Image (spheres, rainbow, N blue to C red):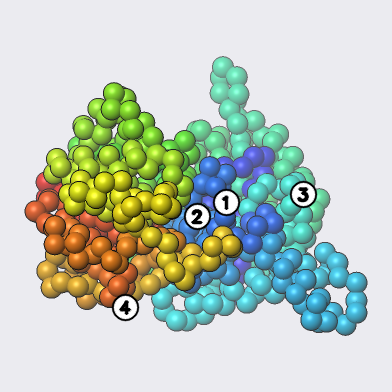
Amino acid sequence: MKYVVVSGGVLSGLGKGVTASSIGVLLKSAGLRVTAIKIDPYLNSDAGTMSPFEHGEVFVLDDGGEADLDLGNYERFCDLNLFRDNNITTGKIYSRVIEAERRGDYLGKTVQVIPHITDSVQDWIENVSKQPADGSGLEPEACVIELGGTVGDIESAPFIEALRQFQFRVGRENICFVHVSLVPVMGPVGEQKTKPTQHTVKELRGLGISPDVLVCRSQSPLTKETREKLAAFCHVSPNSVMSAHDVSNIYRVPLMLKDQGICQALEINCNATDLIPRWEKMADRVDNLGQDIHIAMVGKYTGLTDSYLSVIKSLQHASYSVNRTLVIDWIEASNLENQEHEDWNTLRAANGILVPGGFGDRGIEGKILAAEYARTNNIPYLGICLGLQVATIEFCRNVLGMENANSTEFDENTPHPAVIFMPEISKTHLGGTMRLGSRPTNFQVNECMIKRLYNGVEQVDERHRHRYEVNPDLIKQIEDAGLIFVGKDETGQRCEIFELEGHPYYVGVQYHPEFKSRPERPSPPFLGLLMAATGKQI
């Protein structure tokens, strides 16, 4: 097993996740079976109870694990299906060690960070790195490990120490340390400053880890002088100083690193498969897309676009297939509750409307109004999770005449509960208690748009994250009026997909299809939205 550890310095948000994912692509291009692990040094057990404003989206895995959004980067770039144990948190590690102490596993010893916490981290990495992740069922040959946070953070200290020890456990020849840092450009002549990187590498080396490769974020390519200076002061070869400068699209990052010789630094042959030529074609295609296509995203976390990262990526993947340049018009849902707000002009000008998932009652009436506008004006619409629920509420109110129909999430005393709390879900514990992970959806009809988009299969497996569902008692009334639930769960009771009869594309899905979209295999519901928005026949 070969390990690549990606750490970061100077400041957060430099792109460690994209760097780690890009290295995964290059390892795959060498013909290696790859997996990935993200270490998050926070005390939460997982990201499930975090606000999207705090941490970006919660990425849901096949086994129901609620994880950091970087696992989505790994899955999309490397075409993997990861699991909850691929995301290590301080909370998980300490819980495991304390449970072992309570069982008496430590034979009366004093339990300490070293060796008990650091050993637990190393054991976890070794075990998870052997779990198949690419669908082959075979043990991976290489594992990319991203250490979250910034070197020097007190939270990450136990993990850095664990990784320092880990290099001796697996053999220094089997592990490569990649450090992502910042080279800011200062002054009127645009001088590239190396001092921040010098300091972060000095700190990392002081903790016992000497990086083999530097990946330096900068606005423009690193000069020869900058590379040589970094090499001299950071104890790396000049050939191992990579410039991660701004590029035209994200798919050029692996290609950029390859062109600078990172494959030689990793001692792999990146031309062993056809993966690199495919990525080159994809990157070229993304740079040469056709005219703009406008999708209105009616959400409630629009202040931080990372809150909808997988939705954005899924829209982009679909836009590549229809050869259009995607323009997302962000609309704060609560603004639509004012009929005079300028966001109404943005909504009316859009080629399609998407209402994503969310929690809480803020902006709900605005989302309902967006669904009504799409329904009554034949505008292509995709509702995801909450987006399906608000469209159902709107239909009950305005087509079935159920005044004040609502979800019991927002109005417990609604006279017409169109959406209700699922009976098996806990009302006292929030963490990990939703309907989570990959679940089957069975098509109820022989012919419909969404089934065609899924290539005519009878069943699809998609990932879920919700506590509420469409009220089963209202399904017959809703369907008799033309909103057909074409997909249901294995019991035939829980509604998963709806389509509106006679509409060019009015689709809602209770699951989150964005989590399984890939650049070369766009998610079918998103592809349908983009096809309908461009006037293509589905």
Which numbered tag is attached to residue 491? 4
Density class for disc 3 (Cα within 10 Å; few <14, some 14-19, many ≥20) is few
Q: CA distance from mark 2 to mark 4?
A: 27 Å
Of the two numbered discs 3 and 1 on the same chain, state the one appearing first in sequence.
1
Q: Secondary structure at mark 4?
A: loop
Mark 1 — residue?
50
Mark 3 — residue?
154
Tell whether label 4 touches label 1 (CB within 8 Å). no
Which numbered tag is attached to residue 86? none
Front in this rendered view, residue 123 or 497? 497
Of the two numbered discs 4 and 3 on the same chain, state the one appearing first in sequence.
3
Left or right, residue 61 beside residue 407 = right
Tell whether label 1 touches label 2 (CB within 8 Å). yes
Residue 511 in which image quadrant: bottom left
Which numbered tag is attached to residue 58? 2
Q: CA distance from mark 3 to mark 1?
A: 21 Å
Query: Percent position (x, y) of residue 76?
Result: 41, 59
